[in-house]
Amino acid sequence: MPDTAVFDVDGTLVDTNYQHAMAWFRAFRRYGITRPLWRIHRAIGMGGDLLVAHVAGQQVEEEHGDELRNAWVEEFDRFLPEVAPFEDARALLEEVKERGFRLVLASSGMSKHVDAFLDLIDGRSIADAWTTSDDAEHSKPEPDIVQVAMAQVEGASGVMIGDSTWDCIAAGKLDVPTIAVRTGGFSPEELTQAGAAQVFESLRELREGLDGTLLARPDRAAA
């Protein structure tokens, strides 16, 4: 049984995926590049160092990669005041922590963004550790951020809670199972195909169904 719950933040605990997609859409448009928003959305959760080439091609990455990432920061910063936590985000964290699991909030976002998100859920008061993009050499779908999250609390066995296919793929590379929630806008089929062990519609549904997951109470799990 796992001893550590690794929670993705963006799109899982706070409602940001569509803001991320729109910020990338606007960043690309600055350089005369238009990509359908739905395609950009499907890349959200992947690190920005990989997203440009994934969405727009290697030539665009080579010509404008760093400039596009800087433009994305400017565009996303405009959305920050509108970002809100999902219903039951804090209650779910409290419930998982009360069950005795180590709790890590594993984000690969920029430090200033992670700080804002942690404030929204008062994450510092409950998490054993948290991460930012500064903590990992490679972004998702590489497993670095999950590995760093586990190492920060000396976790022996973990379970990932995420919203995107990239969360599932990254965790799967370490044989860490993923419980997925649909808060990021990905379908159950997409999440399952990416490796999710279970998919829940919302954080509330997950909280109410915890005893049917790897985050069950020890006495329920033993039974």
Image (spheres, helix red, strand yellow):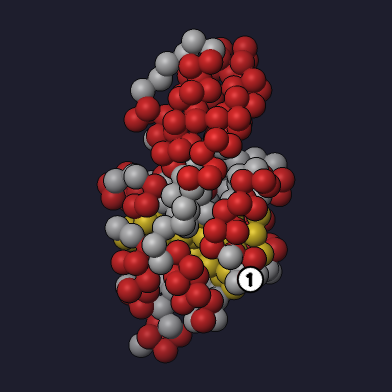
Q: Residue at x 39, y 35 (%)?
A: 42
What is the x, y in percent for residue 126? 60, 72
What is the x, y in percent for residue 82? 48, 45
Q: Residue at x 55, y 35 (%)?
A: 78
Classify residue 73 as left or right of residue 137. Answer: left
Q: 157 above or below 133?
A: below
Q: Residue at x 62, y 12 (%)?
A: 63
What is the x, y in percent for residue 47? 56, 37
Image quarter for residue 185?
top left
What is the x, y in percent for residue 60? 55, 14
Mark yes or no: residue 169 visible: no
Residue 162 versus residue 117: which sits nearer the camera?
117
Report the residue that reaches farthest toward the front: 81
Classify residue 17 as left or right of residue 70. Answer: left
Mark yes or no: residue 201 visible: yes
The residue that mark 1 highlights is: 125
Q: Residue at x 59, y 58 (%)?
A: 118
